[in-house]
Amino acid sequence: MATETLRRTGVKELLAAATLDREVLVKGWVRTRRGNKYVQFIALNDGSTIHNLQIVAAAEQFPEESLKDVTTGACLAVRGQLVASQGKGQAVEVQATEITVIGQADSASYPLQKRGSDQKGISLEALREIAHLRPRTNTFGAVLRIRHALAFAIHNYFNAHGFFYVHTPIITGSDAEGAGQMFRVTTLPPEHPPRTADGSVDYAEDFFGKQTNLTVSGQLEGEIAALALGKIYTFGPTFRAENSNTARHLAEFWMVEPEMAFYELEDNMDLAEDFLKSLVKYALNHCADDLAFLQEQYDKELLGRLNFVVENDFQRLTYTEAVEILKSAKQKFEFPVDWGTDLQSEHERYLVEKHFKRPVILTNYPKEIKAFYMKLDEDGRTVRAMDVLFPGIGEIIGGSQREEDLEKLQARMQEMHVPEDDLWWYLDLRRFGTAPHAGFGLGFERLVLFVTGMSNIRDVIPFPRFPGSAAF
Ligand code: ATP
Ligand code: MN
């Protein structure tokens, strides 16, 4: 009865409470229970913050037997007095008057039993196998709160700067996006698909009457919107069916893609740099507790690195200049570098971590190694591409000024065997009221990886998809 009249307060709010000595109701999950025959201490966490609330249960009122289900992982409702803590380590605590076990967690079988619920004793790899429980660890709680804060900061930044959020399709009818291998979307029966006279699968019979795939980028549709609304961004799931088993690639990830009419390459770089700095700053200002935890547990240089990125200019140079630096580097690379080859992650990281020791923006790549839609430079050899390279990450952003000239774009499409039929609408943008424009794609998980200091991208998304794995 009384439980109904007293409203629940979150742990975060209680820990910051200014008024003490009052009755409170709190609900959450047990992280640890310890104590002696006079008193038991329960560390309760409800996800609102990395910090636990200490619940004090005096033995007179709560004999050992009454707490047998108060085990790590169990869900509790606790009523009690919020008081100044008598012990060290916390400012306030709750002296329990009533403890109700809402949900038990059998201590013999609860997987996060060991060492409470932080990652100690159970590896990050092992936690990936229990993706349904890992959000209850300190590490994933911190990562997920930071991930949320960054997503919010992205919308916040764009809204404040006059960008409109546009939803581009996830199922795409064009396979010319050119950014990677795609996942097919079909409802045809895999064993006996309908066939045409020549024996190939008849996609005219498929759900959409043609071949369709999961998108690898919202950019091309983003350009449609930018040439009408001026400044837009997309923020949605993207899919790449590449067999890249690395710590920086996922098969399903989230991409942020701003696209701006009347922006040239310089403007694009200025935006990318200001955008990234403001996101990192937001995390520093709003996720201090979670960042402090991650720094302490995993990466002593985390905060130093984040502050450095906010405070220093990114180094800007051309691909051609970068190749000169790499060729005269003392370091031996696994892959040789020469003008015209694509840079490998070892090269990117050398430039960022060894040579310049700061984020780098590389521009004007050879046209052969970049997409067909990038604007050709005067020399006809390079395009107005830009990649932003970050310490520990490598490429975090890829972008460019787009080719706005119809004939030049058509010529590039022919050279690169991109069929015009599929992209007639994209060419129309150059036929009707074309304008210079530019944009970029930020891999959201690479940003979260950088800000959290985690080392594997599979640990910064709740349900990672990678080759051979879509268990949850
Ligand atoms: P990489 O060379 O690292 O494989 P990319 O050049 O293929 O990346 P783009 O097509 O330029 O990537 O995509 C824009 C951004 O999306 C990249 O800068 C990166 O941050 C992110 N990204 C690309 N592929 C993936 C992936 N498989 N998993 C997570 N993020 C990705
Ligand atoms: Mn790229």
Image (tube, rainbow, N blue to C red):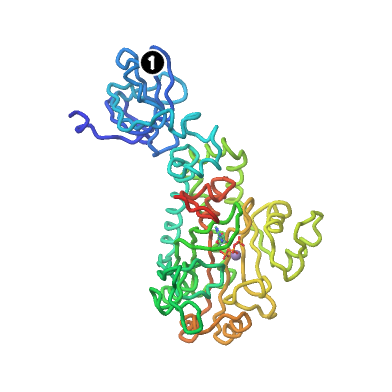
Please give left or right for residue 270 compared with residue 160 in the image. Answer: right
* 97 lies left or right of 438: left
Going 42% across and 23% down the picture, which residue do you hit?
33
Q: Quadrant of the N terminus?
A: top left
| Residue 68 percent across, percent down from the top left | 36, 21
Q: Mark 1 points at which residue?
A: 39
Please tell me whether residue 143 is drawn above or below residue 9 in the rendered image.
below
Answer whether residue 92 is visible to the viewer in this image: no
Q: Examine the rendered structure and indicate whether residue 378 appears above or below residue 284.
A: below
Q: Give the image location of residue 91, x and y in percent.
A: 41, 26
Q: Does the Cβ of the disc 1 residue fall within 8 Å of ligand 1?
A: no
Describe residue 328's horizontal placement relative to residue 79 as left or right: right
Residue 80 visible in rendering: yes
Q: What residue is rendered at 54% in x and 72% in y?
A: 438
Q: Kindly identify the amino acid type of the residue bearing the numbered disc 1.
A: Val
Expressed as whole percent of the image width and height from the top left, the position of residue 298 reads: 58, 39
Give the percent coordinates (x, y) of residue 303: 58, 42
Q: Which residue is drawn at 82% across and 55% down?
A: 330
Name which residue lies at 53% across and 64% down: 441
